[in-house]
Image (cartoon, rainbow, N blue to C red):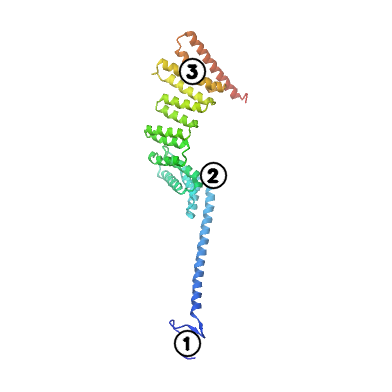
Amino acid sequence: MTPTAFFITRNENMSMNGETVGAPRMRMGSVAVGALAIAAMVGLSACSKVANLKGIMAYKEANKAYQVQDYKRAAGLYEESLQSDPNQPAIYFYLGNSYDNQFKPGVEDPANDALLAKAVQNYELGIEKLNKPEDVKLQKLTLQYLVAAYGPDKLNDPVKAEPAVQRLIRLDPADPANYFALAKIYEDSGVYDEAEKVLDMAKAAKPGDPTVYMTLAGYYNRQGQFDKTIGALKERAEKEPNNPEAFYTLSTYYWDEAYRNNRLKDTEKKAYVQAGMDAIDRAIMIRPDYVEALVYKGLLLRLQANMERDPAKQQSLLKQADQFRDKAQELRKTKASGVGD
């Protein structure tokens, strides 16, 4: 063998005895690189699994802390869980609510204000991420808490509360509570026409719900619109013809107007007292042992007596009033002693 045979350059055909030497070496190098890549991927996968496991454990511990109302610890653990896996929509509600529950209304402190800011931030993130059909209930709950955070007891920001409530209405147009919340925002802001429109929308959304009519009556009463107040209460009684409380409530509004409104004419006052009497009689007919109704029957009789000019009739009415008062007191004593339970 000549000396030159021992020197093979990179550019030469690397073969000895007819066998290629370079190709196997290159293949071995590729295998080594592939093995390193796989090892790296396995390492990353293992790290990811460890991180996910830590996130799951933190989430479970956070839920335990949340259930026992340890909201500070819960918030820290939910944050830890989100760092491991930010794609957990439900956590944003619970994290926001954990901060929300730590907030103390009326306490002027930057740290306290920061808690509410974090609550709002996470509620908004939750609403954005809870976008699957199975997330609707939690999304609705998150919106409700966001509205409360913008309410008068906390941030007092009706401008930001309004679109959140409107979104609640779109999410569940059959729930009158959402309309009530929006109407309250408008009422508190002095936009009374809009408040009334929204309450009418609530009635249209759920016409069989007595709460709708009571809410309407309350609104009209605050506006000093007695006729509309009575109209709403009558509609409520029509929806619940066998509910004595519906007729009792109607009678109390008649009594209150007749007793307190000094601008009423005698004819108006007499008409209101009689209407109240008709309503209270209906309540007592449905439920004879209705103590509160018996009390108001007596009060209405006394009002009637005050307007009576015939002394004999006046005394008769007062005597009846005493009888209903005494009956109400006897029933209270009986119920307090447990007799008949």
| Distance from Cα at disc 1 to Cα at disc 3 | 127 Å
Q: Residues within 10 Å of mark 3 (few under 14, many from 20)?
A: many
Q: State whether residue 178 appears in this view.
A: yes
Give above or below for 256 relative to 42.
Answer: above
Q: Quadrant of the C terminus?
A: top right
Q: State whether residue 103 appears in this view.
A: no
Q: Residues within 10 Å of mark 2 (few under 14, many from 20)?
A: few
Badge nearest the viewer, 3 or 2: 3
Give the residue displayed 47% in from the left and 15% down from the top. 304
| Distance from Cα at disc 3 to Cα at disc 2 | 51 Å
Residue most extreme to the bottom? 2
Which circle's residue, 1 or 2, is located before the other in the chain? 1
Residue at image mark 2: 67
Give the residue displayed 49% in from the left and 71% down from the top. 33
The x, y position of residue 201, in whole percent, is: 43, 34
Which circle's residue, 1 or 3, is located before the other in the chain? 1
Task: Confirm or deny contact between disc 1 and disc 2 (CB under 8 A).
Answer: no
- For residue 230, the mark is none
Residue at image mark 1: 6
Number of marks present in the image shown = 3
Between 217 and 335, the one lying in front of the other is 217
Secondary structure at numbered mark 2: helix
Residue at image mark 3: 300
The x, y position of residue 50, in whole percent, is: 53, 58
User: Quadrant of residue 271 in the image?
Assistant: top left
Tell me the kind of residue under disc 1: Phe
Tell me the kind of residue under disc 2: Gln
Secondary structure at numbered mark 1: helix
Between 165 and 328, the one lying in front of the other is 165
Which circle's residue, 3 or 2, is located before the other in the chain? 2
Tell me the kind of residue under disc 3: Leu
